[in-house]
């Protein structure tokens, strides 16, 4: 059975309530092709593997998130956390071990945007630099 994007639970240590969205966290390495003299097939030279920054977001709830954002503003660049992303079935029951990103550092906060003529939910996002994934 194919999973839907809603079948994941994303949690951050030290922050209550799961997040609705997660982007990033992909593991990549730079690569270069080197054609040594007379060779038609290149050697591949790679750089060190790195994990992309992760951005998590959720609908803004003033009862809980106003205080959270106020607490985190002065901690940008110092707040560290573990992010877990757990794959679930349609009933949101875990399908196994979560993907864990440990030692993540908060590097940005995107606060809710406002428009007096909109019925869209106000969302906020947190961006984390990620050292590793397991």
Image (tube, helix red, strand yellow):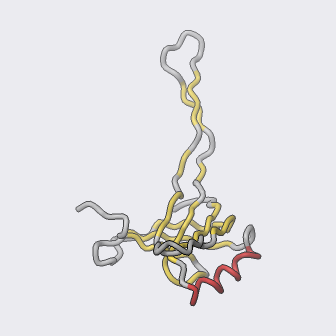
Identify the residue at horizontal 63%, vertical 66% (top origin): 104
**Quadrant into which the N terminus falls:** bottom left
Q: Which residue lies most toward the top here?
A: 38
Q: Which residue lies most toward the left here?
A: 1
The foreground one among 62 and 102 is 62
The quadrant in which residue 88 appears is bottom left
Identify the residue at horizontal 38%, vertical 68% (top origin): 87
The foreground one among 45 and 109 is 109
Q: Position of residue 102 (x, y in %)?
A: 59, 68
Q: Position of residue 80 (x, y in %)?
A: 67, 72
Identify the residue at horizontal 51%, vertical 72% (top origin): 117
Horizontal arrangement in the rendering, residue 129 relative to residue 94 (left or right): right
Horizontal arrangement in the rendering, residue 70 relative to residue 121 (left or right): right
The quadrant in which residue 82 appears is bottom right
Identify the residue at horizontal 62%, vertical 44% (top origin): 48
Image vertical order of residue 19 relative to residue 127, above or below: below
Q: Which residue lies most toward the right here?
A: 74
Image vertical order of residue 41 relative to residue 70, above or below: above
């Amino acid at each position: 059975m194919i999973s839907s994007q809603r079948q994941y639970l994303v949690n951050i240590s030290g922050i209550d309530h799961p997040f609705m969205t997660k982007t990033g966290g992909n593991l990549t390495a730079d690569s270069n092709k080197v054609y040594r003299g007379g060779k038609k097939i290149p050697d591949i030279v790679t750089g060190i593997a790195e994990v992309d920054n992760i951005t998590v977001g959720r609908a803004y709830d003033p009862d809980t998130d106003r205080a959270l954002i106020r607490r985190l503003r002065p901690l940008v660049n110092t707040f560290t956390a573990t992010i877990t992303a757990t794959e679930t079935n349609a009933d949101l029951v875990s399908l196994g071990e979560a993907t864990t990103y440990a030692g993540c550092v908060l590097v940005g906060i995107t606060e809710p945007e406002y428009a007096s003529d909109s019925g869209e939910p106000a969302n906020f996002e947190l961006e984390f630099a990620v050292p590793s994934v397991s």
